[in-house]
Image (cartoon, rainbow, N blue to C red):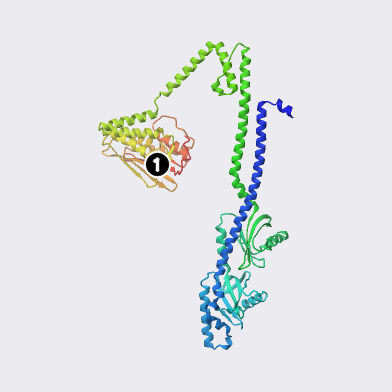
Amino acid sequence: MLDYIKKMSFKKKILSSYILFIGISCLLIAIYILKSMESAKKENYSYMYQFGEQVSMSTDVIVSNMDRIRFLHFIDDKIKHMLRRSMKEKSMEELLDENDYIERALNHMTNMNQYVVRATIVNEYGDVYSNVQTNNDAYLEKMKEIDKAQDWTDKNKVYYTGIYQEEIYLLPFEMVTSISKMYDINQENYIGTLYIDLNFSNIRQMLDRLAESKTSRTKLLIFDGNQEVIYDSEGLEEGFWEQMDDSEREGIKEFLKSNGTKAGEFTMRGKKCLAASVRNDTTDWQIVAWMPLSDIYALSWKNMVGIFSAMIMLLITAVFLGVYLAGQISRPVMVLAKAMGEVDKGKVNLLEQEKYGWQDEMGLLFKSYNEMGKRINDSIEKIYIYQINQKQTELKMLQFQINPHFLYNTLNTISSIAALSDIEEIVKIADNLSGMFQYNIKGDDIVPVRKEVLHVKNYLEIQAIRFPGKYQFEYRIAPGVEDRKMLKFLLQPLAENSLQHAFGKMKEVNIISLTAQEDKGDIIFRLRDNGVGMKEGQVEALNRELARTDTGTLVNNVDKGIGLRNVNARIKNLYGKECGIQIRSEEGKYTEIQIRIHKMERQENREKV
């Protein structure tokens, strides 16, 4: 192996070392990606745990407001005495007064919690007091059955039922009921049982808002104490367990067996999921925030794309760098060997050190070779130097050619001298012409409308100075249009056409007006003159010709009206066939040129004509 490496060329050795470097880099990237995936799992678990805690705290806020109802007999001692007496011992008048009093007290308490629909107290004698006057024996029987099934050793215990359907005033409600016992202040004497009915539809809306407020793909499940699903952010509470196969059901139930907080994984509907569980001690609900591992990895991979792309670019750069360095070592040797080989033919080719740029040991060798060649090829060198000097002279001459910047600066100088001499017309003409030159030399093909209109104004003001008192120019540009983008050099050629062709016979008032306004997704320009106009047949023929112009058309003929046809072709090339120029005219009265272009918000498009 060592002998094989010794026989390898410099270029192959360099390339082999870079291939090894690339292989090691790819391995490190793979390790980094795997670690990033694990880090993403930990971060998402922390996020899901915090989300579960937030849901648990929101649930606590709902149920904590019900403590005032549970302690109503402590808050109002009068109610406690009412509950301690049987209805059989009370007169009808007392019975009505006490029912009304307790009902108003319960109403006051329930109105303080938007989630509470009804509160019902059944005292030790079986008497029923409620803020909603319903005679629902089935409801009371259901509550009694649930009540009997509970262990009430802990006198402070509050039990929450699962979700069930209930009608109140013939309106259907989705209910969850909390059941708690009422004792005196010493927790010795039993007073009654309190049933507080919660509207779970309102609770679901609150949970939906919490779930929707999260920008991640975290989903939410809530199980009651019997491991029944009471909320699923995907809306699949009914039939939740039926959608799982046996192994998935067992995996989820095993996950739910833990108390308190737990992180783990389970399979749901064929997807491996990461989950965090938070148990709400008040309601005994188990809140599970979960997310498919595929989503976690997708999010992690999305974050890794930038880093991975940078590494790929680095590796590609390393490959090109390896090829380049290998060439830097092998190429000088080959160049020098070739030059020496031609010495035997009676010809010495000098090596251009500046061309190769080598300044290392190979550069010194080249220098020695060239010095030897110079003594042999003295005459050839003189010719070579002469040719180089001649080329340099030609290059200098090109640099002295006049360009638009020189004209632009010269006009500014003329304007300054005219201003000092108080010749206002020359100042205006120089400034306008300077503005036109500046507009011409700008490289952008897409410009704001206001700049194109200013270019037209500069041109027309020069004409107004040339022919004083002969022309009037009007401009009506709708608000908001000036900041729109448009193709450069559309309006000035048309204004020039109007001056050249519209006023063959001068009128007392020769007017050219330019208007611009928005029309849904387009901008409409209208250039109107009150000149000689055109015959109807001419207008129709010209409009047909303009309409036939297709995208990709180039106008090269230099006949009458080239400005109009050229502008029309440029518009269709950039904006599409539906845009372009249309002419209206009446002989002896007016000519109006209408230009339709699409709105442009950015300068991404460039003229392609």
Q: Quadrant of residue 424?
A: top left
Q: Is mark 1 on a helix, strand or loop?
A: helix
Residue at the spot 63% in from the left edge and 53% down from the top edge: 42
Find residue 369 and report its horizontal and vertical position in percent: 59, 16
Which amino acid type is marked by label 1?
Answer: Val
- Locate the N terminus by quadrant: top right
Q: Is residue 281 above or below residue 292?
A: below
Instruction: Tally the numbered discs.
Output: 1
Q: Which residue in the rendered view is the most extreme toward the front?
A: 186
Q: Position of residue 53 (x, y in %)?
A: 59, 61
Query: On the picture, is 393 further left or further right than 36?
Result: left
Q: Which of 5 and 503 is in front in this view?
A: 5
Percent x, y of residue 602: 46, 42
Identify the residue at image location x=61%, y=32%.
320
From the viewer's side, name the closer residue of 20 and 575: 20
- Residue 55, placed above or below residue 35: below
User: Which residue corresponds to mark 1?
Assistant: 449
Q: Residues within 10 Å of mark 1 (few under 14, many from 20)?
A: many
**Residue at the image point whose x is 49% and y is 16% from the top:** 387
Is the residue 68 above or below the residue 2 in the image? below
Quadrant in which residue 487 is drawn: top left
* Rendered location of residue 529, percent (x, y): 33, 40
Quarter where residue 27 is shown: top right
**Is residue 423 shown to the viewer in this render?**
yes
